[in-house]
Structure formats: C-alpha cells, structure tokens
Image (cartoon, grey):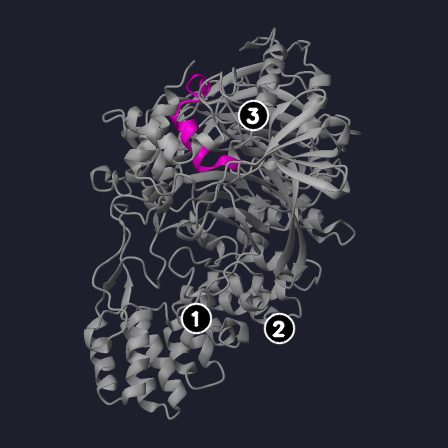
Amino acid sequence: MLKTIWSLLSVIFILTFLGCGENQNSCEAVEGTADQISLDSLATALNWPEELKITSFTGPDLTPSPACLAVAPSGEVFVGVDMMGSLGKEPGKGSVIKLIDCNNDGILDNYTTFATLDNPRGLLPIGNKLFVLHTIFSKKTGKASGMDLVVFEDKDNDGVADGPSKPLIQSISSPKFLQDRGTDHATNGIRMGIDGWIYIAIGDFGFHDALDRSGKRMTMLGGGIVRVRPDGKEMEVYTHGLRNIYDVAIDPYMNIYTRGNTNDGGGWNIRFIHQIQSGEYGYPVLFKHFTDEILPALVDVGGGSGTGSLFMDDSTWPEKFNNVPMMADWGRSQLYIHRVSPDGPSFKQQEEEFIKLPQITDLDIDASGRLYMSAWDGAGYTGDSSKGFVVRAVPKNWQYQPFPNLKKSSVKELAELIKSGSAVARLHAQQELITRSKKTASETLWEIASDESLPLYARVAGIFGYAQVAGEDGIDQLVALTSDNAVTEFALRALADRKTRIDKVPVDPFLRELKNPSKRVQIAAIVGLGRLNRLEAAKALLEVPVPESTAAPAKGTEGPHALPNSSIIPAHIAVRSLVSLQAVDACIDAIGGDNTQLALWALRYMHDTKAIDGLINAYDEAQDEELKKRIISTVSRLYKKEAPYDGSWWWGTRPDTHGPYYKSITWEASDKIRDFLREVWSKSNKNEKLFFADLNGKHRMGITEFGGEEETQVLAQNDSGVDLEKIRNKKGQIGKSSIEDVMLAMAEIKGDAALGKKLFTQQGCVACHHLNQGEVMKGPFMGQIGSIMNREQIAESILKPNASISQGFASVQITAKGDKSYVGFISQESADQITIRNIVGQVFTIKTEDVVSRRELETSMMPPGLANSLSYEEFASLITFLSEQKE
C-alpha cells in the first residue's frame, strides 16, 4: 500500500521541481504544480493529523537516500544525501544539498550542492556556518579512516561552502568497523543545546583516540553522548552505556532524550531514555545482571529502529503537539510523540503515534514553525537514487513570520528573540548575541537571566548565554542567582558547566543545595560537585541516601532496565561524582558507618591499590558478618577491570551481556585481591564457600578453586565481519543473526537459484504467493518481483515484513452482517464480492452488500521468522531465485 502511494507522490515531486535550478543567481519563486488533491488522499491513507498541512518539498531527484537534515532559523533546509546507506563502503556518494523556498509558499524554488562529502550523519547550521558529522575516507587506500565533526562556512551566502571544511573533532568513530560494516552502529546526529554545547550521538562502535582542537584525546568504549564547544574544544563524555542512538532531543531546560535499541540478543527493542549528565545506562555489560547500578530507561516500547529526534518547542504549533519530544523510528515508519510529565528529577512518559512516513530518518524546524521531515522510503541498506524525499508540515492556521537577519539585528532585537516562544529563535539569537562586545552581551543576557517576570525558558537561555560570555567574571552573579528558587538548578549547572572555568567557582552553593527539597536542584548540585574536582565535597556526597530500589537482581534473573525509577537517580549520580573525584579515602573511611552502602557502591569502580588496601583493612576490622560479605563482594568486583579500548574490537550486534566487564583483564592489585580472597575462602564453611562460587560466576573472576561460572576466555568479538565459510551452511543462522549481519552476508553470498526454487516451496512461500499469471490469485504476485525489488529489498521484506508491506499483502479486517469478522488479505475483489484469505490459508467470499466495515491494518499477513531455520547459503539462494523472477 505504502509503496503504491509513494510512487504516486514521486510524480508529484517531479512536477513540483519543474523550473528549479541549481546555483541560480536570483531567488525568484517558480510556481509548482503539486496536486494537492492527491496529497490530501495521501494524508488520509497515512492518517496524518488533521490539524496539520503536510506537503511535498523534494523527491529523489534532489534528495535520494536522505540520512539527515537540519533547518536554519530563516528556513533554508540542509539535507544530507547518503548513497552509501548504512552498510555501503564505497566513497564519493554523498553530499549536503541546500534547499530554499524563496517566497515561503511551501514549494521549493532553488537549491545548491552545499558540499560534497561521504556519509553525512549530522547537520547543524549556526549563522553562516554548517557543522557536519560525516565519514572520512583515506585518499591512499579508499577506505574509511574514521568520522569527523567538521565545520563549513559560507560567508558570501551563495549556498556553496567557501572551501574545505575545518575539523573540530577527528576520529570520533572507530575506522575498522566503518570499513567492515558501514555506519549502522557509528556516530550519528548532532544538536546544540541552549548551553552552547554541541551534543553528539555516539553509536556502540564507540571510538578510540578522538582528537579535539585543544589537543585533547579521548576514547569511549560503546555508545553514549559526547559534547564539545563550537570551536572544537573541551570534548567530554556526557552520558554512557547506550546502544545505537541516532540523535538527541534537547528541551529548553537542558533535558536530553534519546530513542535507541536495546540488546540485539534479546530483540531490537526500543528504549526511550531521559539522559542525565554523568549517568551510566549500562549497555551491554550492566544491562542484565547489574541493573541496580544503572539508570533505567523511561520505557521499552518493543521493536524498532530509532533515528532523528527533536524537542518541539514552538508557540505557533497547537498545544497538543507542542512542548514534547518527537522521536522518529525508521523501522516502524513512524514519528512518535512522548508526552513527558515530571517525576522527581526525571520524567514519566506516554508514547503516541504522530506522523507516519516510510522509513523516516530525521526532522527539524525553523524559527517560523515550519517542520521538515526526511524519509528513506525503501532506499535500502546501501542507498538508492530512486528513493527518498522531504516533506514540510505546518499547522493549518499557520502563517509565515519572517525571521530577521541576525547579523543586522540590534542588541535589543536579539534580546526580544531570546524571550520568544520559539526555541530555535532563542538559540540562534543567543548565539549571535554572544558574538557582540562582551560588556554589551553580558549586561543584556544578565538582564534576561535575572528578570523574575520572564518565562522560565527565557531566563534559562539568559543564564547559559551569560555564562558563555562572562566566563570567570560572571561567577559572583551566578552564585547570587542560586538563591533564586526559580532558577537555582540552572545557576548551579551554569557555574559547573565548563571545566576550563571552574577554578574560582565556590563549592558552598553546591553543598548547600544538596538539601534543597527539589530533586532536580539536588541532582544539579551532585553533578556539579563531581565536576568541580573538590575532594572536600566527598563527605557530603556520601550522605546521599540509597533507596531500597537499588537491590541487585536475584541470581539468574534480569533486573528492570526500562522502568522509570526516579528514586535511584540521586544515589547513582552521587556515585558517579565520587568516582570522578576518585574519593578513595572518603569512601574507605565511610565503611561501617551510616553511608556504607554508597561508599561500597562507589568503590566498585575504583581500581586503585589504595582502595584495595583500605577494603582489606576494613574487612579485618569489621565485626558484622553481613558487612564482611559486602566488602568481599566489592573486592571481588575489583579483581578484574575493563581492558583499555584500542579500537580493534567491537562486541557486534549480539554482545555478551553477562558483565560486569566485556573484555576483562587483571591489573596490578589482582594478585593481592586473589590472595586475600583465597585466604578468607580457605577458612570458610560449606555455605560460605557457595557465596564465593556465586561471586566467582557473577564477577567472572576465573579463580578455579572457587567454582561457579569459570571464565576461561574473553568472549569479546574481535572482528565484526561475517566468517562466511564457517557459518554459511549452518542451519538456523538466519534466526540467530541480526538483520545487518544477514545483509552483509547476502552481499557476499550469491546462492543457487535452483536451490532457492525448492526452498520457495519447502518454506511455505507457495501458500500465499504465486509465480505464474495463470495461477489462482492468492497473495502478492512473485512472477516479476525481481523487476521491482533488488536482492537487498527482497531480503528485508522477508526478514521484516511489517517494515516493507507489499501491495495487497497488508492485513485487512472486515466486519460483515451477522456480527461476522474476517482478518486476512484481499485476493480478489469485484463490485459484488470480496475474496479474503486468512493466515492459515482459509478462503472466504463476502458479498459487498454485507460488508459493515473495512479497515486496513498496519501489519503484514506474512509472519516474521519464516526464514529463521535457513542457513546463510539457503537464504541467499531463496532471494537469488526471487530476484530472477522478472516477467
């Protein structure tokens, strides 16, 4: 159904572009001929919200395979075209296209190729600069050498970058896996917060030895969020323990949201997560058996593939669609709204379907309220020049409001924009204002920050803007602002925001606000104390209470990793701050007192010989047997540590999730730990020895005499590539592999069409499909499938039937007279009767006059998993056979 609709829309796109040209000297509007009647039909078919007007903007002739997009505040749209897709590896197939609607009537008038580059994955326009995240290819080898965050400039405003880009961060994705797999788990979207940082979504490839402009190098095992200043300096980790996020949504109060996969081994489930600075979210090593140590997601919504995201904050939009995170899901072809409501320092949420688009990739909005969305539209895993489009959405009562030229705006005009109801206008006006004279900008931003009559979002923009401009000179003013209850949280965050500017920031306001009744203020204080690097704060941090909800999951069970649990957040963040401070002495001194639990929790991550000596001494002095067991547990956790990540390995799409380390190694104190544990073990009775066996298995120490789950080898996957010779004929490999690994294998294995023909019958395909025109109509005709779909698309439609529903194979529910109900697909229909076939092959004929209601469902009649029992070779043979059906 969707494919037929979008084939019609592609014609509309082409008509819309008649008369448009690249690099036009003038921006004269060219009237398009889009068929609004057809678009209205499309809106009905996809159940678009009736409050919105959604129209075509570009099609595949200009923006094929659009991986990302970003919109300037004045409405220019930048689209990242990526003909390599997520698994392609050949360079020279990407670009950034700039699109302009000159007369603001919703129809494209002009476009330019802004820059030519590979694998664009994130775009951010600020002034005449465009920040771009993309893959870099070696000129010598032709292979990917990493991903860089770069910046282009267009000072003459001709729609084309003035020259080569300037790197801000280099090597922010591991090159080995870009070469082996492509970008499917790499570094992705970028977005700027009102604090002036650029936030970067890091996939679970992680990165090794990334380099920023200050010369700082950083390595990150696995996924998370990294942030950097616009000049490419001060790179730092914001959160860690995420899998394959594609983008970040940031609200006016610096709440950050992501939509990312969970563990592939247990399903491609999507988690919607509130990102709290310094938080650990656990993928994959703490994800199952150590969930008491992580911050849980707000919800697990089931299977999907999260892509672009945006926090909608625009007063021109209807209230029901405003002030919400909007999260795209490529796998579900759906843009979702998550309605968040406060829950202590975090949120609870309710997910709602919003706009349906086939394989939506990204979205962004301008300062006038025009929302643009890009869709992959079946372009496959390696890109397709005939697929992909961009649409525009505005409220039906929306009226265009021109956005001023910020460079020519007065300070007073910029200040008014910072107070406006558009998050886009606020951000860009703030960023322009901080380029003006320091004195003028500081005074103006402070006036906004301290004005109690203004909306909170305006004051927050003023506070973070003031902190950026004033630097150390603004510390006293921000400290004074911590006494203003309405903005205490944001004053604290601004004070501790830049580690390069914290030497003169006093610790007292942070210690004071640990007792604030607001949990959000408490979290800001706890995070700040970890960033200020003052060891004197450790004692106060250790007083943060640990709730009962932090209990570890029972042996052999998996704890909740996707249930909101706001009570755990203060203790979790306090632990992260204690670890950041390396507060070993304070934690050791706290053992045996009221703060023992938090102290031992923090010590689990302190691989320091001083910590080991202190723990052993504490054990010798302890009188309570339960306390002794807890100390032994902490020491055993420290027996090994995570191996330094060198970028040569990755855990693949089905990682070992046992934990607590992925690629563990011993360290300088391991011998002392082993000797201590052996001595205690040797004096233990039988029941006590069982405790050691449990720890040996849980912490994978591999101390043979303890028994338990002995660790004999590192289970890390050293090469994410598919060993075809070993597994190509292994039965059931399709059901045990991720779709990305299957696609990579199919690119290498041709298969045998003759075998595929046999499998077409053996796997039951003939029950619902026919190959010859003369056969009785059952389901989608396969006799010419190879002429309309390539091998990759055929494979995807089998593996993920609901993501690529063939025409005529969507489920239909018919209610007929006599309270009869039928669910199946329509195999034949005339003016008088409908023939429907259900999932078990039963055929029913219903008179048209007896039909009471008819509804098309959003699921395929083809069940998933039909190919799970096949080997790679067999599956390749089946899709090769089908690809050769070209009547």
Q: Whole-percent x and y of residue 851?
A: 74, 32
In the rendered image, which quarter contains the N terminus?
A: top right
Q: What is the quadrant of residue 85 in the picture? A: top left
Q: Secondary structure at mark 3?
A: loop
Q: How many numbered marks are there?
A: 3
Q: Name the residue tied to disc 1.
A: 535
Q: Which residue is mark 2?
A: 515
**How far separated are the C-alphas under marks 2 and 3?**
61 Å
Q: Is residue 145 visible?
A: no
Q: Crowding at label 1, few (<14), some or many (≥20) Cα neighbours within 10 Å?
A: some
- Read off the magenta span: 783-802
In x, y percent, where is residue 91? Answer: 34, 24
Instruction: Judge by depth and name the residue closer to the eye, 362 or 842.
Output: 842
Can residue 22 be spotted in the picture?
A: yes
Sequence-wise, which precedes: disc 2 or disc 1?
Answer: 2
Do the numbered discs 2 and 3 sit on residues whose CB atoms are within 8 Å?
Answer: no
Q: Which badge, 2 or 3, comes first in the chain's sequence? A: 2
